[in-house]
Amino acid sequence: MGNVRTGALEYRECVGEDLDVKRQVPFPHLINSTPDESVVLAWIVFKSRAHRDEGNAKIMKNPRLAKIDLHAMPFDCKRMAYGGFEVLVDAIAPQRDKRRQPHADSSGNKAISNRELGS
């Protein structure tokens, strides 16, 4: 959440749950992960590249960052990828009627909306 505190519009971290794809390159193959490892994908939305650079500069000045032991991280930093992207397509689903119940997937997991999270 550090990026949201420094100006990011959105911050998401997602763990892979359906990565055994056919006829395409699966994420585990791209990073040479083993079956006992989880694949995590994160992205951050900023107003612009300048806005991103300003937010990242704030993060790098945070004294807590200097205290982080990179060897004690719960992931392999050498397989972490980073890059900036421009939006090519921006499609947002219309807001659902808040009286309707969130959809539950086939495993019974209930989707949680931002409204339910209080944001």
Image (spheres, helix red, strand yellow):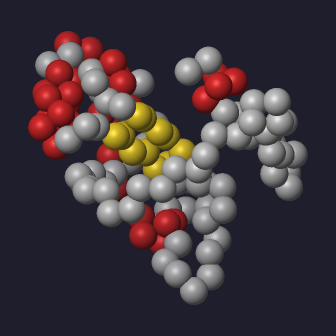
* 37 up-or-down from 35: above or below: above
Q: Determine whether 29 is above or below 72 in the image.
A: below
Quadrant placement of the C terminus: top right
Could you tell me which quadrant the N terminus lies in?
top left
Asked if one can make out residue 87 in the rendered structure from this viewpoint, the answer is yes
Q: Nearer the viewer, residue 32 or 93?
A: 93
Res. 60 in view: no
Residue at position x 62%, y 82% in the image: 22
Q: Quadrant of residue 75?
A: top left
Q: Residue at x 20, y 36 (%)?
A: 52
Q: For the image shown, how many numbered marks are present on the structure?
A: 0
Residue at the image point whose x is 25% and y is 37% from the top: 47
Residue at the limit of the structure toward the top, as seen here: 63
Q: Is residue 47 left or right of residue 79?
A: left
Please give left or right for residue 29 compared with residue 118 in the image: left
Q: Is residue 83 left or right of residue 88?
A: left
Q: Is 68 or 59 nearer to us in this picture?
A: 59
Question: What residue sits 33% from the left and 35% below the top?
Answer: 71
Q: Position of residue 12 (x, y in %)?
A: 47, 39
Rendering coords of residue 97 (x, y %): 75, 36
Q: Tell me: 2 left or right of 112.
A: left
8 versus 43 height, above or below: above
Q: Position of residue 58 (x, y in %)?
A: 17, 21
Q: Residue 48: x, y in percent?
A: 20, 41
Kindly indicate the quadrant of the structure image that contains residue 44: top left
Q: Quadrant of residue 117?
A: top right
